[in-house]
Amino acid sequence: MFKELQQRVTALIAIRVTFVTLMLGSSYIYRIGYEKLLYPAAFSYFIAALYFLTIIYVLLLRWLSSTRQYVVFAYVQVTIDVLSATALIFLTGGIGSMFTFIFPLSILSAGILLTRRACYIIATLSAILYGLLLDLQFYGIIRMYDMDFYTEKDFFFNIFAHVIGFYLVGYLSGYLSEKLHRARKSLEERDAVLSDLKAFNEYIIESMPSGIFTTDLKKKIITFNTAAQEITKVSQREAAGRTPDEIFPFIRNLEENADRCEGEIDREGEVFPVGMRLSSLKDSAGESIGLIGVFQDLTELKAMEAEVKRKEKWAFIGELSASIAHELRNPLASLKASVEILRENKVSEEHAEKLTTIALSEMDRLNGIITDFLLYARPQELNKEIFDLHEVLREVVTLLENSESANNSVRISAQIDGDLWVLGDSRQVRQVLWNLGLNAIDAVDGQGVIDIYTAENKNTVEIYFRDNGQGIDSTEIDKIFYPFFTTKEKGTGLGLSIAHKIMEEHGGKITAQSHGPDKGTVFKIVFPDNRGETEEKGELINVSERMAS
């Protein structure tokens, strides 16, 4: 407020000097209307006095140091301007003077410098002085230019018109002045708020532990916060004007709004991992104005992940070892007992035959456990080929219906008509389907029903095994794919684990969903979509079959 008022007062002084020089000075130099002046010498002194006042105003500016002093100084100047205008009109003929327009200029100056109230004050002062001047001229109290051309009505109407004009100018000037002051105040408040918000945002960005950079539409870096400089060892000056991929080469082909990506960058000869997310930077209208990148140094996180994985690995090995020992201990105990009894040779031939049968059964059980464990633990080389998944399913369903585990009360409903070509190892996929089928048969009892069907989605091929058995408890459903976890009396707990691992090697997965006891279970096998390759292969197969026929 103080600085703005100071600028306006200074501008008023400069405008006054310009006006005196151009208007009054030129009138004096070129003697325009000079012959009509009653006091030519006084006119010269008047111009000189205005220049003298200007000098005084300039000198007084050095002594003013507060808003209140400038307000008083502005009132004094505008008041002197009105008095000067009155004197000028007196010198140039009163009612016939061409300089009556100076009064509205003084009122406008009051509106620009001061308030609405000041406009009315200066308008009132102008009306009083102008009316008084014309009254004195009309009654001949002061001697002016020849008034034979003007009547009483001319004087009255002149005063009336000018007074109305003065107050109208005062009203308009005051109204605009008030609007101007309010707008200025509002802008100052908004500017303060915006400055605070800008500073606040800068404080937030600079205080964040993650590195942040922003770019313009040409993908040139504009900002590079403190954390970004510390992580990359690149200063703001060095980063400004460069593209992000010059500092982070791994994002060169990354699209905007991409999922979080990871890569490596070189920092003073040291390569270290970085995680980043790129997003579009938008303005208040939602238009894109550049990019914003947020990144972190993943060195410590990667070390922690490696340590966690190492500990999980050893914990898993420990659990697996304990499970293997438990699974082996039971058949070994039975086998040992049978052999010890046979060694004593104190049992009948019939009983000895039963013990031998038990021993052989336990050996087969041990061999099955070892075989299944090796199948789970040893990496299997995939022999991928294009095969008809529905054909394999039909074979598995036939085997399940004739297996020892199935009984007459279990009904298998398979909706697998037509063909469905997929890419994978048909032998291992058959093992997965067999294991899930046996698991479903074991889960149902009484009038059990197993539904088997497939579905093709946009990116996957899915196989469903749905049973109406006893279901899986919610506390156990997350453990069913763990090795040696089983709820069956005779199960090893490796069937689902093997199936799960085989599907992982194929790039797919197996999920299970159960709504609780006695509500059944749904197993879903998800194959990745290799439809482009399988359709091409399927066409070749169809062509070959037609040629052979």
Image: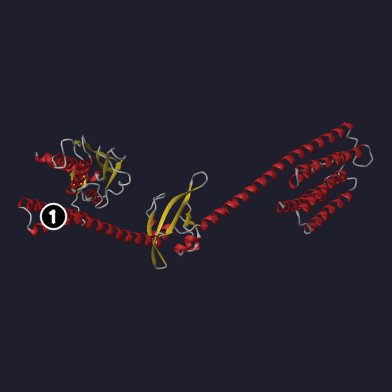
- Which residue shows up at 71% across the image and 54% down it? 3
Where is residue 187? Give x, y as percent. 64, 47
**Is residue 528 or residue 311 the one in the foreground?**
311
Q: Is residue 133 left or right of residue 231?
A: right
Tell me which corner region of the image, top left, top right, bottom left or bottom right, holds residue 159: top right
Q: Is residue 461 left or right of residue 26?
A: left
**Is residue 190 or residue 357 the one in the foreground?**
357
Q: Residue furthest bottom?
A: 269
Where is residue 328? Give x, y as percent. 19, 56
Q: Residue furthest right?
A: 141
Where is residue 383? Give x, y as percent. 18, 52
**Can residue 341 be spotted in the picture?**
yes
Where is residue 129? Give x, y as percent. 86, 42
Q: Residue furthest front?
A: 346
- Which residue shows up at 92% across the image and 39% down it? 136
| Residue on which disc 1 sits | 363
**Is residue 336 or residue 101 the one in the foreground?**
336
- Which residue shows up at 85% across the image and 53% down it? 49
Provide the secondary structure element on which disc 1 rests. Answer: helix
**Can residue 380 be spotted in the picture?**
no
